[in-house]
Image: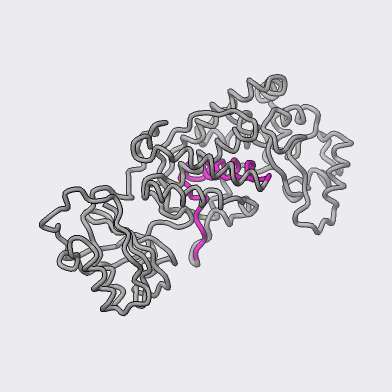
Amino acid sequence: MAAALLISLVCIIVLSSNFHSSNAKLDVHYYQETCPLAEFTVTEAVKQAMSSEKTVAAALLRMHFHDCFIRGCDASVLLNSKEKNQAEKDGPPNISLHAFYVIDNAKQAIEKMCPGVVSCADILALAARDAVTLSGGPTWDVLKGRKDGRISNALDTRQLPAPTFNISQLQQNFLQRGLSMDDLVALSGGHTLGFAHCSSFKKRLYNFSDTTDVDPSLDTSFAAQLRQACPLHNTNPNAGAVLDSSPLAFDNAYYKMILQGKSIFSSDQALLTDSGTRALVMKFASSQDEFYKAFAKSMIKMSSISGGGGEIRLDCKRRLVIARSATHCRSPPVRHPSPPSVYQLLSTTNHTAAEQETLLTTTLWPPMNAYCSGLVVGELGHPDMVDDGGVVTVTGDIALVAAGRGARQEMNGLEIQEIFIFL
């Protein structure tokens, strides 16, 4: 109960909140005034990661694609699973996603400069663009202003286009997201980066049909190479093949390989089964510049798929935790003439409950215990739980952000380590 009382004392009138409308218009200059170094900070994080891990670029691009194709571009792919909910990142198509640390590093650096301002969804969109550009590909202006979503469900990953899709399935999947045939072919070019595990294309190599063992659309010698890399009874979970002949360079080699019958996924080879998509494959194979222009245009379009997000996480792996109710709260009679944007209080760890209350009421301006009490705190759908290191935010007239440890039912025994008050 002491912890619940402790939290109830820490309330302050909101001047700006971590909760925002998901309908805000995207804008290239969205953070120009509020966090002008955000874009630079993301680029530096991606550069640093790519210098030490060669697969980062492909991972970030794929991560952004998988995010936008489920509920829109709302960073739902970044959320961790919880006991009662398996998140998207643990759905079968996303098990091989990695390099989440790049987004976390960028977010942490940005939070030090501009706390509670830049969404994880925007950071991921910027990181995907930087991954392409730093791999030798095109660049483009990233529209910003996305908000982070609260829903992440592993079952929703079934909506992602599968590597076994035929052209009709691909076109329908993209059309459902407002993406055209041109977008389908251009965005498929993202497969110029990266690697595929055997399980994603093994069906093309063994028992393909009743009449043939190997997919006849595969080049014979190329199929033999793939069978060597992925034997029928393969036991190596890391076995697989690169997606094109230059897997670390963003170029048009992917399209050339499709025309040669050397694609990895059957969904890639399916682009030749429709006259319209085939013409685009041939166009991009013959002109890298045309591919670059089309890819940048389609990435802007895909990255603008509206999500259901309405908050800005402070930790990309965790939702904001919101208060279910607040009682007996009223505005303090006096306002600070020019309050700082953030108060960071001294740690309350290793203090008794009475000492904690004293620290809080004497450190905060003005004394908070006179104005607010009776908070019931918890995440939406889980009102009795607060994540380790989670965020507590009260919506409406009051905003509170806290990092805690050792969550207990009904907040009993919750030990508060740090408390941040956002004005």
Residue at 42 percent of width and 45 percent of height: 119
Q: How many marks?
A: 0
Q: At x 68% / y 19%, what residue is drawn?
A: 287
Residue 34: give x, y in percent of width and height: 34, 40
Q: In the image, what residue occupies the spot 69% across and 34% down?
A: 249
Q: Does residue 378 sit above or below 254 in this rendering?
A: below
Colour scheme of the picture: one colour
Q: Quadrant of residue 262?
A: top right
Left/right of residue 421 with respect to residue 13 in the rendered view: right
Who's the residue at 23% across and 63% down the image?
364
Residue 117 falls in image quadrant: top left
Residue 144 in percent (x, y) is at 42, 36
Q: On the rendered structure, is 243 left or right of 32? A: right
In the rendered view, tell whether residue 139 sits above or below residue 194.
Answer: above
**Residue 335 at x, y = what percent?**
15, 53
x, y percent for residue 307: 43, 42
Q: Quadrant of residue 385?
A: bottom left
Would you place residue 408 above or below residue 332 in this image? below
- 343, above or below 264, in the image: below
Between 36 and 414, the residue placed more toward the observer is 36
Magenta residues (range): 54-82
Q: Nearer the viewer, residue 360 or 171?
A: 360
* In this rendering, position of residue 411 left or right of residue 232: left
Using the image as rendered, state which of residue 71 and residue 365 is in the foreground: 365
Question: Residue 30 colored magenta?
Answer: no
State the quadrant of the N terminus: bottom left
> Which residue is the extreme one toward the left?
333
